[in-house]
Amino acid sequence: MVSFLIAYATWSGNTQEVAELIEAQLADAGISVTSYRIGGGVIPNPRHFDAMIIGSFTWDQGSTPDEVKDFVADVGYKPENVYVFGTGDTQFGGDELFCHAAVKLARFYESAYEPLKIEQSPRGVQETKVIEWSKGVIKHWKNLHE
């Protein structure tokens, strides 16, 4: 069975909501999912999963939160098959810095798939965007491994 790790950092709950929507889509597709809230104890080893999805909010004018940086450092290597999502707020830095943490993580992990960027909470049109992105991740992963 295919297995994915979803690791995410959240303060307001928005990034967790996105992670839960992604998890539901993966589970519906028959993928085993382990979710891990960054900073929440023992880090699951990404080597035990077929792919990793990492999610982060963007903080302080386009910055990646320290706990996400610590997670990346603690993992200690760059897993293959990494997908990235992020939440943010365009009122802090405009379009240029919107979800910049996700952009930086995708670049760092050399993700072959465009990061998902969600304005604050995944409701309404944003929820649809998460669902479509998740389906795209599944399709992308399957295309790489068929």
Image (spheres, rainbow, N blue to C red):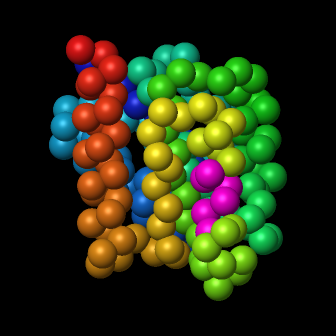
Residue beneath the point at 65% across and 24% down:
78
Query: Is residue 26 in view?
Result: yes
Quarter of the image for the N terminus: give it.
Answer: top left
Magenta highlight: main SS: helix
- Assess whether residue 93 is covered by the magenta stretch: no
Q: In the rendered view, would you say 123 is above or below 43?
A: below
- Assess whether residue 101 is covered by the magenta stretch: yes
Q: Residue at the bottom extreme?
A: 91
Residue beneath the point at 66% across and 59% down:
100
Circle count: 0
Q: Which residues are magenta?
A: 98-103
Quarter-of-image position of residue 31:
top left
Q: In the rendered view, would you say 121 is above or below 129?
A: below
Q: Residue at the front extreme?
A: 96
Q: In the rendered view, would you say 115 is above or below 50?
A: below
Residue beneath the point at 74% across and 55% down:
64
Q: Which residue is more in the foreground, 27 or 134?
A: 134
Residue 50's spot in the image, x, y percent?
A: 42, 21
Query: Is residue 52 in view?
Result: no
Residue 138 lies left or right of residue 54; in this view the side is left
Q: Which residue is more in the foreground, 66 or 41?
A: 66
Quarter of the image for the C terminus: give it.
Answer: top left
Residue 5 lies left or right of residue 46; in this view the side is left
Residue 15's spot in the image, x, y percent?
A: 52, 62
Residue 116 lies left or right of residue 105; in this view the side is left
Residue beneath the point at 70% across and 80% down:
92
Residue 49's spot in the image, x, y percent?
A: 45, 22
Quarter-of-image position of residue 135:
top left
